[in-house]
Amino acid sequence: MLLGVIADDFTGATDIASFLVENGLSTVQLNGVPQDDFPVASQAVVISLKSRSCPAAQAIEQSLQALAWLQRQGCQQFYFKYCSTFDSTAQGNIGPVTDALLDALGETQTVISPALPVNGRTVYQGYLFVLDQLLSESGMRHHPVTPMTDSNLLRLMEAQAQGRCGLVTAAEMDRGVGIITEKLQQLAQQGVRYAVLDTLNEQHLLTQGAALKNMKLVTGGSGLAIGLARQWAQPGQGNPQIAGAPQGKKAAVLSGSCSTMTNRQVARYRQQAAARAIDVARCLTESDRMAYATELADWAQQHVDDPLAPLLYATAEPETLQQIQQQYGMAAASHAVESLFATVVKQLQQHGVCRFIVAGGETSGVVTQALGIRGFHIGPCISPGVPWVRAIDQPVSLALKSGNFGDENFFARAQTEFPL
């Protein structure tokens, strides 16, 4: 095992796994830290946690457990993966987890590289941009759990971590591997614990990969994985995507994300296929939820032979979402919808559905847990950061999409470009 990734949410794990496979590393994603040391025949392993917005102490505990498991497998390099929009608060969890991993490994320095230029996430002079907007001026400023009101990664990191932050500029990045290595050494001599890496394009990611291959712990979004995978990959080893290619015919689409792009994707797909909105009120009590889940599963089963798979969605516009949260409470509404999806998915599987296209990190985690999937092989990409994956222990294929990933026609393309 060459590279071990500790990812702070489910779709983020799938995101980085797809870039590793696309750039030459065979990759298995595991749903949580294994409770045993079962063998994984793969060059890279991504462990997906649910640690992005839980209490910092809990995030640290989960991350250290993941690190310990990877160390027992003989892993050579470790990668703490968080969102390309650096989702966190002044309390964490990116800073505290990074500090805990550094301490556990006995290391004194790492890098901060959330950029993913192919999806419009870039860093310049230490400021994080979403397309042409500063992070703090993008839709992330209204995030209900981790509102991002500052775009400066140095300030964000120092506010929640225990050390000082420095910067490797875009100009230094353009000058190549030697200059980056020299700058990191200078920052280390100055006692700088975290080095933010300016990143404007994919060449910067490739340069970072070459400069950081021997760094024990790196941190960032999924973009840095492109550069590191190119360094670790061995020529002539075949196509690592084959193991995760989708199989089976019957499919269903489930959407729990309320992001801007997912709203557009749902609106587009409703014009193309059978679609049904989730009624939150009918999810709130367990007895009603079970009956409602059966009703929804039966409805979906009636449409699985349609040209495009049926869609069940809890996706809502910001105004509608706010009304739901005010009426039912954010936590109660989210838990009720997640529980409903878990029940529906199990019933659909019993009906023979074996392909699931899922939008939203939380929803993706719920679906895989409901299906009892321990891990999966990573297959071909539908959109940057969104591959098809195939369970390692049962005949189930999934496309697990972070909220803002993919284009408007994502749900249909996931089927038409990879025929059912």
Image (cartoon, helix red, strand yellow):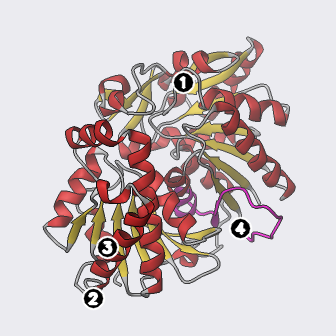
Q: Which residue is mark 3?
A: 296
Distance from Cα at disc 1 to Cα at disc 4: 34 Å
Tell me the SS state at disc 3.
helix
Q: Earlier in the sequence, mark 2 or mark 4?
A: 4
Residue, disc 1: 172
Q: Is residue 385 at least partly visible in the picture?
A: no
- Image coordinates of residue 338 in percent, x first then y, are 44, 57
Q: Position of residue 51 (x, y in %)?
A: 60, 42
Q: Is residue 136 left or right of residue 223?
A: left
**Mark in front: 4 vs 3:** 3
The reply to whether the C-beta atoms of the residues labelled 1 and 3 are less than 8 Å apart is no
Instruction: Choose top left, top right, bottom left or bottom right for residue 352.
Output: bottom left
Mark 2 lies on residue: 305
**Amino acid type at mark 3:** Leu
Position of residue 320 relative to residue 391, above or below, is above
Mark 2, Cα crowd under 10 Å, few <14 / some 14-19 / many 20+, is few
Separation of disc 3 and disc 2 at Cα?
Answer: 16 Å
Indicate which label's residue lies in the foreground, 2 or 4: 2
**Tag 3 or tag 1, which sits nearer the N-term?**
1
Q: Which amino acid, mark 2?
A: Asp
Mark 4–mark 3 distance (CA, rounded to whole Å): 38 Å
What is the residue that sits farthest to the left in this orientation?
Answer: 271
Three-letter amino acid code at the position of disc 4: Ser
Which region is colored magenta?
A: 17-41
Q: Nearer the viewer, mark 3 or mark 2?
A: 3
Task: Answer few, some or many: residues within 10 Å of disc 1's Cα (few below 14, many 20 plus, some between 14 and 19).
Answer: some
Categorize mark 3 by other alpha carbons within 10 Å: few (<14), some (14-19), many (20+). many
Q: Which residue is mark 4?
A: 42
In the rendered image of this protein, does residue 247 appear above or below residue 172? Answer: below
SS label for mark 1: helix
